[in-house]
Amino acid sequence: MKLIKSILYVLMVVFTIATDAQEIPPIQIFTPQDYGAEDQNWAIDQSLDNYIYVTNNKGLLEYNGASWTLYNAPNSGILRSVRIVGDKIYTGGYMDFGFWTKNEQGRLVYSSLVKHKDLSIKVEEDFWGIINIEGYVLFQSFEKIYIYNIAEDSFDIIHSDSRINKMFNVNGSIYFQKTDLGIYRIENGEQTLVSSSEIIKRKEVVNIFKSNSGLLFLTKEDGFFDLTNGEIHPWNQDLNNLLKGFSIYSSARLNDESFVLGTIANGMLHVNKNGKLLLQINQSYGLSNNTVLSLMDDSFGNIWLGLDNGINVVNLNSPYKVYTDKQGVLGTVYASAKTDNYLYLGTNQGLFYKLIDTNDQFKFIEGTKGQVWSLAIVQSTLFCGHDKGTFIINGTQAKKISSEIGTWGVKEVKGFPNLLVQGNYKGLNVLERVDDAWRYRNKIEGFNTSSRYFEFVNSNELLVNHEHKGVFKIKVDADFRKVIDYSKLPISKGDKSSIATYNNRILYNYEEGVFGYDSTSETFVKDTVLSKLLSGENYFSGKLLSDSNGKKLWGFSKDAIIYVEPGKLSSEPLVNLVPISSEVRKSKTAFENIHDLSNNNYLIGTTEGYLIIDLNKLELKALDINLNRVGFGKHPDELFPSDLVKPELFSNKNNNIKFQYSVTNFSKFATTSYQYRLIGLYDNWSNWSLSSEVVFKNLTHGDYTFEARARSNGMMSNNVLSYSFTIEKPWYIKPLAIVSYFIFAILFIYILYYFNRKHYKKQQQKLIANKERELKLEQLENQRQLIQIKNKNLQQNIDNKSRELGMATMNLVKRNELLNNIKSELSKSKSLNDVNKVVKRINSSINDTNDWELFEEAFNNVDKDFMKKIKAIHPSITPNDLRLCAYLRLNLSSKEIAPLFNISHKSVEVKRYRLRKKMGLDHEQSLSNYIIEL
């Protein structure tokens, strides 16, 4: 019967955990693609500087809070175990174990202890566990435990004929289990049997813890067993019954003495120190895999899970818890409320509820399908503002009391306990309580603007904000039935703006800041404290919310949630930050909602469910920023590691410098941003950036100091990272080069002087030569001018001779023409004897050779070589032909030539014909042209 009850209990618990809703801590997921290695991760440890080291199938992984680095296994085998002792990272794996140390460049370098001590390792021997204790490091395989004395650099070996599954450090004592033999302890380098109880020796023990009365054994499949006074018995039977449904592979005990268990197929379990199951997280709740091969709690209270496929970080100590609607049943949460029995969520799909303090699924309240805008508990009644109207919620039932569509919210009217005012899509409406039941009474006539945000200045005056129209002041009559007067207030409208009342003061928030309403002047006055946090670059949403007891005012910026509460020792309000950015909190912008769950726990609606913030656990600690890598090189994509400790001197060509830095904040909801500056280039800090690295390209020579700082969880880092370096001058401006330049300059000046002197001497000689040449040229020019004058005179003589020849020729022609005319007239006379004497005398004058001789002399003066030249070419021509040639040379026509010969025109043509034949000219060739061109 007890067995049946146990089985039913296990099934009930497993089914409940697997199917019901849970509010779980944030989980940060790293996939193999994120960390750049294979899927399985066998062991995890944390260094003194809070870096995380994980042994992977591919090698050793290092995580600095910003990026992962993989160091390949030295023998390309799988690394199974890791333990950090001081500045050394010990790892064990396939047929090898040793340690890693960081070099000057921040890179890990491996040293094999197996090779160093020439240890005899069995074939296929893996090292699954490493423990450090009192100056010793123990390496465990399935067959042996190697005890390494760090100081003496020596080994002792514990052999076992039975398989050693694991070894454990329990308050400074080393225990291990031999399969089928029992539990042993190492004392003075020897193994001592602790228990060989049948109860435990045939069960695989995965961990051993200290208990109040002795030892507490955690088995793989049967739960916890307590060893007291040599007797072994179950520690918590209910827990053991539950754990029989699981196969435990890894585990750890936390500082609060609770237990974290990693299973083969069911994810992670968290059990308190009394054995009560607190939490189970598996793949359906956010883990990337259900097989937990290793786990480790870090110095911040996070649980690191090395999974069969990936690495997860569970922020177990986080002030945040998350409920995610993975099935999409709820939708986006717009409002929430809590009563004595139920937690309600108003979403875009309706109103849902569940019993408080349970992991029950949320259930839908019938009749509320559609958009819920608000939930408000007024005078112990829960009102639901809905797209369809107004509902009163009683337990799991909804009753519609108003059909006026689009109820944004419901507020009390001071001094009128039986009246409520609600804002709707088309103005303001009044609800009235009659016979202890609320009902719709009337619309307040005279104002039809959508009234999502409204606050009372007094009982009859309200401020209504519309983000696209502005802020209105409305005065209603005493019976709340109509608007007497309303006006728009002198302040800008604002996208995503809102108004809210806090500490008896109406506040208006939009992108320009937060403004308080002054009822006396009916104006808004800027609140400098709040505006600094909720405007400008920080502005994300104008939504302001006052919690139910009116002690906190909430606002939502880009990088945080801000809440204001009264000062404890002064009238000045305290401004607090919840460092969770808009990207992480995933609220619906301008529809942010927050509800006080009690005890400083607040529920914030998101687009995927909701987020719970426990302000009691919110601790803002400043962290250190670490320098991880410095790279330098000629090209930004081809950099070499640099020394991280001492200042570096880089050559001028290696002027591309890259810095990588980080903060070890492993919270999923934390946002770490960085600022940097390079003193020597510019002294001002850069803008805040999420990038954890920066590259400076093509830096000029000089001395530089790189500085970086971080802002994590809204807190500045404890330190400012600093790294100094120098880029050498280029070779051409180094001292030796400058001396060389000086020597070369002197040499150059001397050479310049020498050649200048030589040049000037040469120029002087050249100048003298030029002067002499100029004188000669001048003389020649003078001679030329004299020749020109002579030639000119000769030309004038020739011209004169030509004129004389022409005149002589024309005189001859005219004389002969005259004589021929006279001859012709005389021939007509009647006295023939007298006429004949005159004619005879005229013929004698016409045929006078003296005229020809005179003409010939003049012709030769002008063209003296023509006669000789033509005679030489044509020796057969006669003097009469020469005479014809002379006339043709003067370009005289046959008509002009005829009188000179005292013959007819036709006789001249005959002479020309005969001359052509003597000269042998072709028929087509012109005689005149031929003679002229000679």
Image (tube, helix red, strand yellow):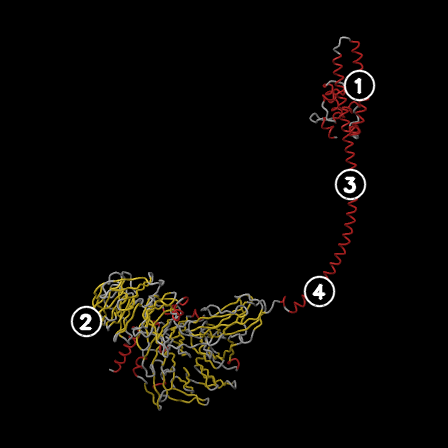
> Residue under circle 1?
847
> Residue under circle 2?
436
Which element type, helix, strand or loop, lies under badge 4?
helix
Which element type, helix, strand or loop, lies under badge 1?
loop
Of labels 1 and 3, the one closer to you: 3
Q: Residue type at mark 2: give it.
A: Asp
Of labels 1 and 2, the one closer to you: 2
Residue 707: x %, y % from top left: 51, 72
CA gap, disc 1 and disc 2: 171 Å
CA gap, disc 4 and disc 2: 111 Å
Foreground residue among 782 and 331: 782
Dot placed on the residue nearer the N-terminal end, 4 or 1: 4
Asked if the residue at tag 1 contacts the one at tag 4, i.e. Cβ–Cβ closer than 8 Å, the answer is no
CA gap, disc 4 and disc 1: 100 Å
How busy is the neighbourhood of tag 3: few (under 14 within 10 Å), some, or many (20 plus)?
A: some
> Residue under circle 3?
784
Residue 504: x %, y % from top left: 31, 72
> Residue under circle 4?
746
Q: Would residue 515 appear left or right of 647 to someone viewing this image?
A: left
CA gap, disc 4 and disc 3: 53 Å
Specify the quadrant of the image occupied by residue 664: bottom left
**Count of residue discs:** 4
CA gap, disc 1 and disc 3: 48 Å
Residue 708 is at least partly visible in this image? yes
Specify the quadrant of the image occupied by residue 532: bottom left
Residue 474: x %, y % from top left: 28, 64
Q: Residue type at mark 1: give it.
A: Asn
Q: Which residue is farthest left?
A: 435
How busy is the neighbourhood of tag 4: few (under 14 within 10 Å), some, or many (20 plus)?
A: few
Q: Is residue 514 above or below residue 88?
A: above
